[in-house]
Every structure is written in C-alpha cells, then in structure tokens.
Image (cartoon, helix red, strand yellow):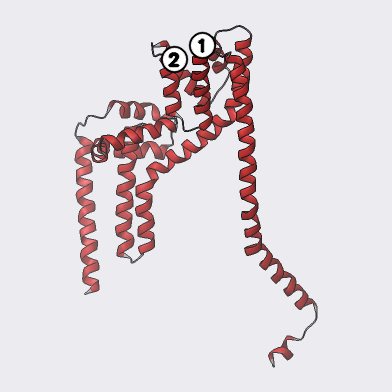
Amino acid sequence: MATTQVALLLAALAALAVFGAAVGIRMYRAEAKVPSDLALALEVGATRVSVAGSAVDRLGMRFAPLVLRLMGRRRVAAKRRKIDMAGNPDGLTIDRYAARRAVYGAFGVLMALIFLTNGALLLALLTLAFGALAADAHIWQATRERKEVIDRTLPDFLDVLAVVVSAGLGFRQALDRVAERYEGPWSDELRITLRQMDMGVPRRQAFADLRRRNASEQVAQFVSALQQGEELGAPIADTLIQLATDMRRTDAQNSRRRAAKTIPKATMVTLVFMLPATMILIATGMFLGSGTDFTSILGR
C-alpha cells in the first residue's frame, strides 16, 4: 500500500513538472509586459549582480506582479521602505524582490515535496524556510552592513563639514563639497538629499526623508541636531563638532558594552569545550606515559 502511494505521488510530481514546463514555455514565447523598474533592473543588473542572481530575476519577472498583489499595498510599502534602508543592494527594487521571492518560494515548495517523499521531514522544513526567507536575507544583511558603515563614517564627516562651514562656505555648498570627497552609502544618501533640495523640496523635508531612509541612530541625531539648530539659531559649526564628539563617545560606550557581553560567552565556550578537552588530553598523556600494563588491568 505504501509503495502504491509513493508511486502515485511521484506520478503526480512528474505530471506537475511537465505541466509547469509547458506553461513556462508558453509564457516564455508569449509577450508579457514587464514592470518598468524591473525592466530597467534587468537591463543594467547584469553589470552589478552575479550571473545566478540575474538568472533568478529573469525566471521570476513574470510572476512579480502576482506576488505584489498577494502581498497587498501595506506590505509592499513596508518592504519598499526596507529595501530603501538597505540602499537598494545590487540594484534591488520591489519588483526584483517579488521576482526572487517567487522563484525561491517555488524552489522551496518543490524541494520540500521531494524530501517528504523520501521521509526527510527536517530537510523539507529547511527548504521551506529557505524559500520563505531567502529573498529577505539579503536585505537584512545589507541593512546591517550599511548601518555599520554609516555609523563609522558620520563622525569624521561631521568634523570635516564643521571645518568647511567655519571657513565661510554656506551649509548647502559645504555639504555638497564634502559629499564629493566621500564614497559609500553615506555619500549616496547625501547626494539623494541634495538632489531633492535642488528639485525644490524644503531642506527640513529632505533631511526628514534622509532620517526615514536610514535605520541608524546617529543619522537621526544628525538630522535632529540640524533641525534644532535651525530653529534656535545656533552656530552650525559648533553643533556639528559637539555632535561628532557625542557620536564618538556613544560608539566607545557601545564598544565597551559589546566587549563586556563577549567575555561571558568566551568563558562559557572555554568551560564547555576547551577545558574538558584539555583535561582529557592531559590525563591521557599521563596515563600513557606511566607505563601501565593494560593487559593486567583488563585481566587478559
């Protein structure tokens, strides 16, 4: 009976694969309207992403609108904000994210069915988790790395900006001049903010958008200090220097806090793994070096 059920399941999977291949060939030959930002990403993405990533995008691009409809407007808006906070890694857009989620999800479900057929429940759960989380893992990693880079760059940037402002250059011109000397995510964010200001967006709104695009607390402090200094009429150079000093002090405190958390973890690893292994090696060496007759101990 079990053999019959397995055979039926394999036959169903084979039929599903044949049907999927037929539908895929038909969709490949048919004309389909690709979303504008996804089409642009596919055109220029080959120069910024790996061959595998580009292939995944092309496989799932026709299913991206369906995935976005299933997500709903609220979740799409939240996901778009997370992609912005990650800095659009490798040219990632919301449509490209939907395409990858479709491909990874289908792969996870198919592999889970195969593993369930062989009785590997754990592998089936792992593949399902991969299908559900693979598209978001890259965003999480990029967001964390981007935040760390911005936090390291911002204090030195504020010192240079304060010097340029103290030299007599206006804040808008100083910001543009200093941003040209930097590279990386913080420079990209400043260029976006300056472009918004050039297009007529009020400075307060442009910097509010800058704070909303980043998860860094130091960026929030920078924007809040600028807005408060503008309201109170405080000298911008003094505000920038004080802000850079506070950021370095906060970063030092966070480093000491992380170091304090690391010491108990290292001690636990030493007690659980290294100390018993060392004691076993010492005891074994002493026992072997004592010249004990094992045959007499074992009674042979």
Q: Dot 1 corresponds to which residue?
A: 172
Q: Dot 2 corresponds to which residue?
A: 203
Please indicate, yes or no, whether residue 194 appears anywhere in the rendered image: yes
Q: What element carries label 1?
A: helix
The amino acid sitting under disc 1 is Arg
Please indicate, yes or no, whether residue 92 appears anywhere in the rendered image: no
Residue 70 screen position, x and y as percent:
24, 41
Q: Which of 65 and 31 is in front in this view?
A: 65
Residue 29 screen position, x and y as percent:
21, 35
Q: Nearer the viewer, residue 182 or 85?
A: 85
The single residue placed furthest to the front in the displayed view is 232
**Mark 1–mark 2 distance (CA, rounded to whole Å):** 9 Å
Residue 23 screen position, x and y as percent:
19, 44
Q: Nearer the viewer, residue 280 or 114?
A: 280
Q: Which of 274 and 47 is in front in this view?
A: 274
The amino acid sitting under disc 2 is Arg
Picture layout, residue 203 above or below residue 211: above
The single residue placed furthest to the bottom in the displayed view is 299
The single residue placed furthest to the right in the displayed view is 290
| Residue for point 38% across, 47% down | 133
Mark 1 surroundings: few (<14), some (14-19) or many (≥20) residues within 10 A: few
**Corner quadrant of residue 218:** top right
Q: Quadrant of the N terminus?
A: bottom left
